[in-house]
Image: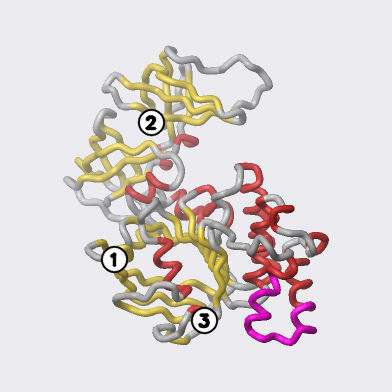
Amino acid sequence: MAEPPAIISVQGVSKRFGGITAVDRVSLDIRQNEFFALLGPSGCGKTTLLRMLAGFETPDEGGVLIDGQDMTDVPPNRRPVNMVFQSYAVFPHMSVFDNVAYGLRVANTPSGEIGERVHEALAMVRLSEQAERKPDQLSGGQRQRVALARALVKRPKVLLLDEPLSALDAKLREAMQLELVRLQHTVGITFIIVTHDQHEALSMANRIAVMEAGQVRQVDGPAQLYEFPGSRFVADFIGKMNLFPARVVDRKGTELMVEVEGLGRLTLPGQAPHLGGPCGVEVPVGQDVGIAVRPEKVHIHSDGVPDGRIALRGRVSEVAYFGDASHVYLRLDSGQVISANIRNETRTSDPSVRAGEVLWCSWDPKDTLILDR
């Protein structure tokens, strides 16, 4: 099945502020009708990139195409995009209806059409019954929906969302994540969200661009990014990860022998798909690499580790309880710490693992990532 065409094409874009390069030669295509996330730590350039798509910042190098049109000389109000800001920016003295209608009135839209389009937008965000209320009579989630309706009422080809859920509490934030996904499916346009929250990006986006220091490190779907990160940065940033420096010391057929700092020598399958990146990599003998395994792939045993698994012994240094799961930290004799996630499947207040216990941890060699950069 052919991929949808690109609605946005970012072509070698750079942006500097004084001596700081905020965005550094970024190129990527964002497809029609997809939910796309720009993800990364604070200061990585994701919001600056979004503002260049909106027209609020001008690239120092490169260019942006939206629906095939060069946006170099197109001002923000003439671009087929609309932006929802972190602060919502709703007008406190206006009703919900008037907030949503504001942009249409500025554009001199006929009054009969304004009413029809505002009611349509409010229905999409489930605020029809609050049309006459003022923003201070609404919850935080409802004010966010007003901002969404005001952006969608102008029927943009692309909706830009700058950390739109950061001001909400955890439970409301989760509900709004589902609401945004539903809304994107309903309106059928491209959504681009900026976030530093990996869980938010993984749960909402079709594809994610992970940024670091102004550059895009990897663009992939959520499962591909999580299970097959292409670099140590992506592996460490997306989810939790046990990550250790190592060196490839030998190769026998399809197997790799690696010397892992603090863990000793391990034998690993040398073929994809367990290697970092979408298609695997060929790692030569003598190369420094990163060895990584997700905590949920690590099992805890009091004894009797099954054959064929990588097994290490250590003392439990800490147990962090999170309700549905506990994170167990096992300190090895070398001083290295390995974390494992265990499900709390039994209804009890008595922990299954206690600090100070000497236990084994193990994982399937195929679950090991070998990261060559």
Residue 6 visible in the snapshot: no
The magenta-colored residue range is 100-116
Look at mark 2 in the image and give the residue it sits on.
310
Q: Marks 2 and 1: CB-CB under 8 Å?
A: no
> Is residue 58 or residue 96 the one in the foreground?
96
Please name the amino acid that badge 2 sits on: Ile
User: Which percent across, then down, holds residue 167?
Assistant: 57, 49
For this rendering, which residue is in front, 359 or 318? 318
Residue 344 seen from this side:
yes
Q: Earlier in the sequence, mark 2 or mark 3?
A: 3
Q: In the rendered image of this protein, does residue 119 appear above or below residue 233?
A: below
* Element carrying mark 3: loop
Residue located 38% across and 47% down the image:
235
Q: Decide whether residue 235 is among the magenta residues.
A: no
Residue 109 among magenta residues: yes
Q: What color scheme is it? A: secondary structure
Q: Main secondary structure of the magenta part?
A: helix
Which of the 4 image quadrants contains residue 91?
Answer: bottom right
Toward the right, the furthest residue is 129
Tell us which disc is closer to us: 1 or 3.
1
Labels 2 and 1: the sequence-earlier one: 1
Q: Residues within 10 Å of mark 1 (few under 14, many from 20)?
A: few
Question: Which label lies toward us, 2 or 3?
Answer: 3
Q: Residues within 10 Å of mark 3 (few under 14, many from 20)?
A: some
227 in relation to 122, above or below: above
Residue bearing the label numbered 3: 79
State the residue in front, 251 or 366.
366
Where's residue 177, x and y in %? 62, 53
- Residue at image x 51%, y 55%? 222
